[in-house]
Amino acid sequence: MAQVLTPSVMISTRCSALLLDLDGVLIDSTPAVSRVWRRWALEHGFDPEQVVKMAHGRPSRRTISDFLPQADVQKEDRIVERMEIEDLKGVVALPGARELLHTLPPDRWTIATSCTRALAHVRLSAAGLPIPATMVTSSDVRVGKPDPEPYLRAAANLSLAASDCVVVEDVPAGIRAGKAAGARVIAFTTTMALDELQGAGPDWILRDCGQIAASVSAGGLVLNFST
């Protein structure tokens, strides 16, 4: 059972690096994501609420395949990517994200996102956040979240084992990917309801990056969670 921290709880844990999701962890792109997928759903005659819920935290090509199994998925994916790149209204850094990243050495954090590489670059730039050299995107993997491949690759790119890292996520698919990779997982309540997060089995549930204080120690990081 995940531990949801209260004001009287303080936890300190060590890890080699942080493996971070992008949307819902470092940046708030929820309004833009919802607008794009609602538009796509309506154009194809699907229930917008169902499509938007399925789209969060997964590669867009998987959502497209689920709803349009006979379609040219690559073509549809390019259309969705273009729509997302063009819609940056309200894409901003989430509380504490900028401060947390600036405390981490470049070789002690990276991003594993279900965005394409082009979209991830655009959103990070729009939010004013640094772009890691080893970022893993949907453009780099064969199988997306909840498969562990994104986080296994992210850790390997830092020459680390995923089991020595802490994953930070905001949706069940990402939480399951991190756990399947052998990592400990922090879940944020930025996107999904608490019970949905708990059902995916994270180790801890926090509000956002503002609750994480990180410091460098010999061979890795020390993370302190507080409210």
Image: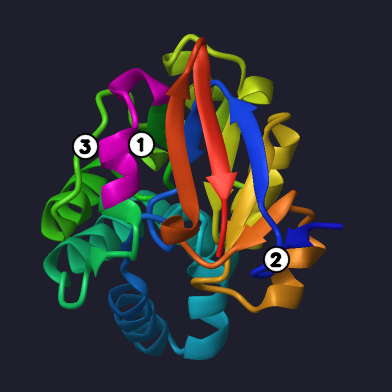
Question: Which numbered disc flags the more N-terminal residue, 1 or 3?
Answer: 3
In the displayed structure image, the side of residue 140 where residue 119 appears, left or right: left
Question: Which numbered disc flags the more N-terminal residue, 2 or 1?
Answer: 2
Q: Relative to residue 21, is residue 66 depicted above or below?
A: below
Q: Is residue 197 magenta?
A: no
- What residue is shown at x 55% (from left), y 53% (from top)? 169
- Residue 160 shows up from this direction: yes
Three-letter code, disc 2: Ser
- What residue is shown at x 33% (from left), y 64% (from top)? 94
State which quadrant residue 2 falls in. bottom right
Three-letter code, disc 3: Ile
Q: Relative to residue 8, is residue 201 depicted above or below?
A: above
Residue at which label 1 appears: 139
Q: Quadrant of the N terminus?
A: bottom right
Looking at this rendering, what residue extends furthest in the front direction? 8
Q: Which mark is residue 131?
A: 3
Question: Which numbered disc flags the more N-terminal residue, 3 or 2?
Answer: 2
Residue at which label 2 appears: 8
